[in-house]
Image: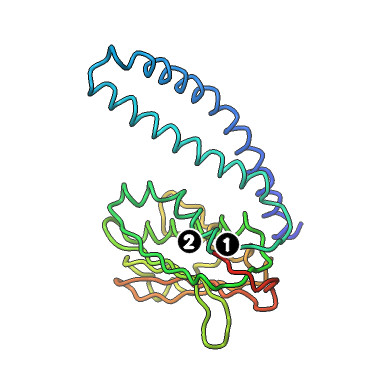
């Protein structure tokens, strides 16, 4: 069996497992919501600090439900074909999903998106997976407080790019030739498949993944999209 077929089979299995897990999560979350709604009915009988706790818990629950819906949509459509895609929209969705992690890690994020990018023929859900993986890697590279820079743009040759840069530890020179290899990882809990899978997913969309890194300073990962995949002049906002 080819490597690409193995990866696709694993993605299909992962999608089914994700959908099953989400189904199991929804029942206890519904119970939590019912209890919160009951407490809100008693609002006039409860002290202010309890009401504030109930409100903040309700907001957190809405956030969880939002993330679940996004993940479920991703798992359900991850094997769909390429369609006209707004890469800025996918970028904002990825940042929205991961911004809780940014806050916990005391990281700030700078987003600069070209509002005049055209629509591209891509698989939106696979692209979301790639963006999430690359942004997560950037967060982990910072190893604490730092800054993440995300950018979409066109160069002078009209090629379309997406990039993520971190202010992290960089990649050692002797490891740079290996990072796209299957199972290569420096993380104690890593699988070594993240970047290699990203690379394959992007190749399926005729996009290229590359990087520049300086040990001890930062890394930048670039995605170059094939201009032949432009399907509309409509802005990718």
The local secondary structure at tag 1 comes to helix
Measure the C-alpha gap from mark 1 to mark 2: 8 Å
- For the residue pair 101 and 10, the one nearer the viewer reads as 101
Label number found at residue 198: 1
Instruction: List x then y, in percent, for residue 28.
Output: 50, 22
Q: Give the farthest residue toward the bottom.
A: 157
Circle 2: is it few (<14), some (14-19), or many (20+) Cα within 10 Å? Answer: many
Q: Is residue 187 left or right of residue 28?
A: left
- Measuring 38% from the left and 46% from the top, which residue is drawn there? 100
Question: SS at mark 2?
Answer: helix
Q: Is residue 34 above or below residue 87?
A: above
> Is 130 rendered above or below residue 220?
above
Q: Decide: marks 1, 2 in contact (CB < 8 A)?
A: yes
Instruction: Say which residue label 2 marks.
Output: 134
In the visual, does 137 lie left or right of 129? left
Q: In this rendering, is residue 42 above or below 232? A: above
Quarter of the N terminus within the rendering: bottom right
192 left or right, relative to 217: right
Determine the residue positioned at 28% across, 11% down.
Answer: 45
* Residue 175 image point, x, y percent: 44, 71
- Report the residue that reaches farthest toward the right: 1
Residue at position x 47%, y 48% from top? 97
């Amino acid at each position: 069996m080819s490597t690409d077929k193995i990866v696709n089979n694993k993605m299909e299995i992962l999608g089914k497992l994700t959908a099953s897990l989400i189904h199991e999560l929804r029942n206890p979350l519904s119970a939590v919501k019912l209890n919160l709604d009951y407490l809100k009915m008693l609002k006039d009988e409860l002290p202010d600090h309890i009401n504030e706790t109930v409100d903040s818990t309700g907001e957190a629950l809405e956030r969880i439900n939002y993330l679940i819906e996004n993940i479920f949509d991703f798992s359900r459509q991850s094997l769909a074909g390429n369609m006209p895609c707004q890469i800025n929209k996918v970028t904002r969705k990825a940042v929205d999903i991961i911004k809780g992690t940014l806050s916990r890690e005391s990281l700030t994020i700078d987003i600069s998106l070209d509002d005049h990018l055209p629509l591209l023929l891509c698989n939106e859900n696979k692209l979301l997976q790639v963006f999430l993986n690359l942004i997560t890697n950037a967060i982990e590279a910072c190893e604490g407080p730092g800054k993440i820079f995300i950018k979409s743009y066109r160069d002078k040759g009209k090629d379309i790019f997406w990039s993520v840069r971190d202010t992290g530890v960089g990649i050692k020179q002797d490891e740079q030739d290996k990072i796209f290899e299957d199972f290569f990882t420096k993380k104690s809990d890593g699988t070594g498949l993240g970047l290699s899978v990203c690379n394959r997913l992007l190749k399926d969309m005729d996009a290229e993944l590359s990087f520049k890194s300086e040990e001890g300073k930062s890394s930048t990962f670039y995605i170059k999209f094939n201009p032949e995949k432009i399907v509309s002049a409509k802005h990718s906002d």
